[in-house]
Image (tube, helix red, strand yellow):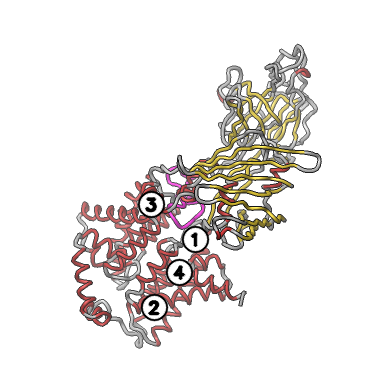
Amino acid sequence: MKQFKPHVACQAEGFLNSYAQVFFSDNRIFAWFLLIVSLIDFRAGTAGVIAVLVSNLTARSLGFSNWFIRKGFYGYNSLLVGLGFGLAFQSGLTFYILLIVAAMLTFLFTVAIQGVFYKYGLPFLSVPFLMGIWLVMMASSEFSALGLSTRGVYVHNELFAIGGNWLIDGVEWFNQFIRNPFIRTYLFSMGAIFFQYNLLAGVFIAAGLLIYSRIAFTLSLYGFALAWLFYSITGADINVLGYSYIGFNYLLTSIAVGGLFLIPSRWSYLWLIVLLPMVILVTLSLQKLFALFQLGLYALPFNVVVITFLYVLKLRLKPGHRLVETPVQQFSPEKNLYQLKTNADRFHSPDYLPVSLPVIGEWTVSQAYDGEHTHRGEWRHAIDLIMVGNSGKQFRGEGIIPREYYCYDKPVVAPADGIVADLTDGIPDNAVGDNNIQRNWGNSVVIKHSEYLYSQVSHLKPGSIKVKKGESVRKDDVIGLCGNSGRSPYPHLHFQLQSTPHIGSKTIHYPLSDYLVERNGKQVLETHSVPRKDEKVTAIRNHPLFEEAFHFLPGKKLVFEVAGSNAVWLNGRHLFEVKTDEYNNSYVECASTGATAWFYNNGHIHYFLNYQGTRRSLLYYFYLCFYKVLTGYYKELTITDQLPPDKVFNRTSLFWQDFIAPFYIYLKPEYEVSYDDLKEDFYASSARLTSTVRITSKQNMRFEVLLANQGIKEFSFQNDKMEFKALCTESS
């Protein structure tokens, strides 16, 4: 029985999501709205239910992915075929036999088309539905036992049979209440998506869409208004929208391009001004062609334009900064937008490879970009590093020999993983004050980190280079020692990034990752910046306690006990387990709630990337507490970051923000973590952290953390409504 329950839950979730996925959603409330709407015409709705169940059960029996079943990917095209089939024909034995066959055929089309389209990173949208419904309609004339339905012809008779005169009067009143032709046509088009040709269905779907997504709802109105305007300007017959119900193509195009498959922004909205006339052009031209075969266009124009446009965007040389493809689909325009905006501010670019300082400890920038001595022209993007003592000088004694300089003989490390592409050794050090103009780069190493990204360190000590050409190196591997070779009047390290593998190649502008800068007597963490002249910079080094505490390997389990909380649902035992998905993305899962918190560790910083699930889970507070933590210890260091608004604010606060989010985000919750005490002795070490989530000027969440025994020992939470302490009783 226990083994059977997950399968039932999978089918139940997949059944509901098959309805929501028609609008690219997995929202449970929206799914119920759409299910109810589909049953307004009970026979058609029942046919849709049967088609979804047949499709999902077929997927399960053939061993297809439970994730795709749960998300409704295998069911929604069959649902649309079932609705269309149920509306067009009378029920009977032949009807149900053909319905089951049509649903299974549509499922096969879904899997086959998915396999082709996913190779190009494209959605298959409702292409399987089009293939399934067209085949059914063309073949239907050959089945003499399959009778055509007359529903929709004698509407008043049907209404009277369902609810008598009161229902007829109610429907008539509703039709008279909404008189505006634009709104009426918009609602008819909305209802037509589910083969429901009445205003009530359109109202229900529009209301569900508004609850599901304010951005999607706005886009549906905006896109339909653009189409209406284009019909008016060009003189095309605008009345066709009222009786042909093809207007849903414009609704779906607007939602898909404006907010789902592209991150919603002013640019996605602007591009709809171009794309919707294309949909209209395809619609008007293909209508005449399909009329010859007595077939409906259905959603063909929407599919043609959206898939073509998304495919064209993938042929760009570089991902656009204006039209941004959704990197991880969360089936909500708001979630996609908030997540990408926050991560873009944290990581700056999806194709950015982190490169650190090539040194250990604190150094000073003696010459930065656009330097006053040598960093000019094609070599302007480079920095020189020295070490300075307490006296403010870079040398001991008189500074007349290289060994008196603090940086001389200090280790130089690989700034990132890579392969040694070029090196020079054997050039002698200069006497202080001299220069080797003939071999001005001195002893140097060039490392390839990726295509068109190389690092170069120069002026190394002769004979100190510890790597060979073609050898692989790991980040922080020692590759040599700082010296005074080449054009170097005093010991220092030259560091540059370049796009070609040769020593002395022209430089490129490339921000460095994860280093500390001293400003106003305090250490500040820089995760994506270029050091400036005279700045004291420190390459981060991990502390074993912090490194082990946030070393979340797949299979690791953490058990927390909460007792005495004024939130009763928090009391008890909570099991977290670290897992990875098929794409090797790591996450922490709560066993009791199913909530997940996705994370990334770049070797120096632990980041939580996303949280999915109920907020009534201890994992939600774990996610907030450790949203961003440096795995090195630096006393009195404070680290800041920004959280996605939808992870902190409630639905009421987000309601108005969602409407304008593509253009402006004014809700900006802040995260801060400060490093307090670190106590060490021969046997053990412990440290305390304090993290704060600032929601508004008056509303904060405060966490206190104890790290001990190479792990998270406890963390506590407090705000104006709730407080608790979670003790880690098991870590394995």
Residue 101 sits in quarter: bottom left
Find disc 2 in the rendering and name its residue: 46
Find disc 3 in the rendering and name its residue: 655
Q: Which residues are magenta?
A: 312-336
Find disc 1 in the rendering and name its residue: 117
Q: Whole-percent x and y of residue 609?
A: 56, 49
Q: Earlier in the sequence, mark 1 or mark 4?
A: 4
Q: Whole-percent x and y of residue 610?
A: 54, 51
**Dominant secondary structure (helix, strand or loop) of the stretch shown in magenta:** loop
Question: Foreground mark, 1 or 3?
Answer: 3
Instruction: Kindly identify the residue that appears in the image at 39 percent across and 78 percent down.
Output: 46
Report the Cα–Cα distance between label 1 and label 4.
24 Å
Please state if 672 lies on the left or on the right of 302 as rendered.
right
Please state if 611 lies on the left or on the right of 360 as rendered.
left
CB atoms of marks 3 and 4 within 8 Å: no
Which of 554/241 is in front? Answer: 554
